[in-house]
Image: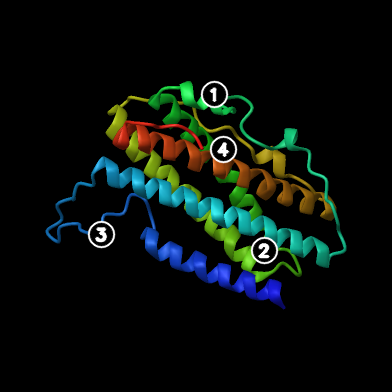
Amino acid sequence: MKKTTVLQVCMVFVVCSLQAVIGSPVDCPDQDTAGVSCIISLEKLLERAVQHAELIHHIAEESKLLFDEMLISFGVVNLHISEGTMCSPKTVSVPMSKTEIQQISDKWLLHSVLILVQFWINPLVDVQASLMNYQNAPSALVDRSKLMSTKITSLEQGILVLIRQILGEGGLVLEGPEDTSDHFVSSDTFETVRRDYSVIYCFRKDAHKIQTLLKLLKCRQIDKENCSLF
């Protein structure tokens, strides 16, 4: 009973957090009624992007917890996940260590964030669709999978706005995101569960990395002093 209560409270926290973020990091609630677009400061854009990333990471952590609870109810314990099969893009160099992240330029911070965000868009859409077919998936887990899918796409839009504002038009030319669709074809029920779990298991780690990179970028752009990783 206590676990259920905690999860219910967390769900309320997620809903309230969504309202606080105002839906999208690129929303402009003070837009002129005459149709003239308002201007959002770089500081506000960065703040919203960081808040968005924090929310996504929180939802990912809660999704992992809910999936663990569901596996226990299925009688599955210690589902082994091979991190090398799914975690992080393999064809694009993304900084991994604190030392690497600290030394890269703001351009490459933006590059790394965009690559990570785009990498996870399709896998999260696939997990959302897959969970809808589970017979006994908790509604809270299904709801959070939808939130993760929606919010990662929204964050991508916000990052593109940041790129234009910080680097200018054409300041960052990237190839299209890595196609991850082939990772998610399986007819075996257990392998489908393993696949979906591995996506959430790995995504929560990259969600934390995205959050960290955006916080560092915000510090460099706005505070400009004592910008180090925690």
- Give me the residue at 34% from left, 43% from top: 46
| Residue lying at 56% horizontally and 44% vertically, measured from the top left | 207
Q: Which mark is residue 132?
A: 2
Between the C-alphas of marks 2 and 4, the distance is: 22 Å
- Secondary structure beneath dot 2 equals loop
Relative to 158, is 65 above or below? below
From the viewer's perspective, is the residue at label 1 or at label 3 nearer?
Answer: 1
The amino acid marked with disc number 3 is Pro
The residue singled out by tag 3 in the image is: 29
Closer to the chain start, of discs 1 and 3, is: 3
Q: Is residue 88 visible?
A: yes
Of the pair 218 and 160, the residue shown nearer to us: 218
The residue tagged 1 is 99
Sequence-wise, the earlier of marks 4 and 1 is 1
Foreground mark, 2 or 4, reads 4
Q: Which residue is mark 4?
A: 119
Query: Where 99 falls versus 53 (above or below)?
Result: above
Q: Residue at x 58, y 44 (%)?
A: 122
Whole-number angstrom distance, CA of label 3 to CA of label 2? 33 Å
How far separated are the C-alphas under marks 2 and 1?
41 Å
Q: Residues within 10 Å of mark 2 (few under 14, many from 20)?
A: some
Position of residue 195 measured from the top left corner of the image (x, y, whole percent): 75, 47
Q: Which of the two residues, 120 or 130, is positioned nearer the viewer here?
A: 120
Residue 96 located left or right of residue 1: left
In whole angstroms, how far apart are the C-alphas of marks 4 and 3? 29 Å
